[in-house]
Amino acid sequence: MQDKNPYTTPKPEPSKTNHKLILTTLSVLVVLLFILDIMLGSVKIPFSEVVSIIFRRDSENTAWLFIIEKIRLPKALTAILVGCGLSVSGLQMQTLFRNPLAGPSELGITAGAGLGVAAVMLTGGSSASIYAIRQLGISGSWLIIVMASLGSALVLSLILAIAGRIRDNVILLIVGVMIGTITLSVISIWQYFSQPEQLQEYIMWTFGSLGGVTQYHLYTLSAVVIFGLLLAFVSSKALNALLLGENYARSMGLTVGKTRLIIMASTSLLTGSITAFCGPIGFVGIAIPHITRSLLGTSNHRILIPATCLTGTVLMLVCDIIAQMPGTQTTIPINVVTSLLGAPVVIWIIISRNNLRSSFS
């Protein structure tokens, strides 16, 4: 029997004009917040100088030029990539599993990245690996990035191998959660037997950071995230079909198994790369898809995917502005800010709509 909910039952949607207006508003917000994110911090830089440095690479104040080019511009661009990547990952997972609580970490990809980092920080002692981390920053060490990527790839390979044998998405989701649980248990064992110095380094990594991504890292992260987003957008028609159920998708000529692998590969690329470069950043992947659906009132992924990118970018830029505590030398972990800022918004949406569960039943 077909479920009656906003995703499986046709319903009137807002006009294309409303969609365009919302997308335009979000785009303007992204530009304004991007510039504001670069302006504010422990040192406030005038708007005119920010524009001059971004577009002309020139400023009379060499200190401002260095701060923007080497620190704030890469950090703001990283916020955009993180907002887009994690939000779209969450959207794909919620659609694939038809579960409002599904997020990019549900398949164990984030835990896999943590396992790779733990293999360096918690088993190597204060060797060359720890020296590299302290010299380059926790997120700025290529060693950490490579190991996190390998950990994500290991879990991804295992999930894809299981996905080839399991057709039920619910069972696959449970298997992914169990693999993540096993991975976290291994990390916990390492933590228990680690020295306090090693444990402190690892805990700092788990807080998440946008500031450790350098200009050189940015090229690699951008390439992977853009490729993952392209895979997601190519799958938008398939995602729309999956909302109506796998049987309906097959009747439309969709190869469900192949589509599922593509969606999982896209999610894994986005989540794994972002976790490797920035550490685990929670909440965004679960919350932003719900916020975007509430704003647009549509289930069409050709609209939802770009809108989710914009909404995720807005949230990450706002969180980054708050995290760097303008006018002070204090920086709050980005994970703390995303949770404190976004969780009340999601609670409000759930209470006001009162039908979130039925949307995925």
Image: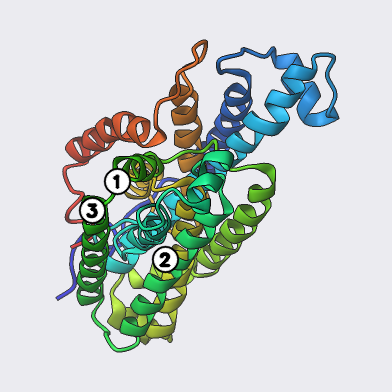
Which amino acid type is shown beneath numbered disc 1? Answer: Gln
Seen at 35% across and 72% down, the residue is 242
Front residue of 35 and 207: 207
Contact, mark 3 vs mark 1 (Cβ under 8 Å) = no
Front residue of 98 and 85: 85
Q: Give the image location of residue 64, x and y in percent.
A: 73, 18
Seen at 17% across and 36% down, the residue is 351
Which amino acid type is shown beneath numbered disc 2? Answer: Gly
Between the residue at mark 3 and the residue at mark 2, the CA separation in whole angstroms equals 20 Å
Seen at 20% across and 76% down, the residue is 171
Label 3 Cα neighbours within 10 Å, binned few <14 / some 14-19 / many ≥20: few
Labelled disc at residue 193? 3
Left or right for 45, reference 195? right
Seen at 17% across and 56% down, the residue is 358
> Is residue 4 visible to us here?
yes
Residue with the mark numbered 1: 195
Which amino acid type is shown beneath numbered disc 3? Answer: Phe
Quadrant for the N terminus, please. Answer: bottom left
Labels 3, 2: front one = 3
Contact, mark 2 vs mark 1 (Cβ under 8 Å) = no
Secondary element at tag 3: loop
Front residue of 240 and 132: 132
Labelled disc at residue 151? 2
Disc nearer the start of the sequence (2/1): 2
Q: Give the image location of residue 21, x and y in percent.
A: 54, 37
Q: Give the image location of residue 152, x and y in percent.
A: 42, 65
Secondary element at tag 2: helix
Labels 2, 1: front one = 1
Labelled disc at residue 115? none
Label 2 Cα neighbours within 10 Å, binned few <14 / some 14-19 / many ≥20: many
Direction bottom: furthest residue: 165
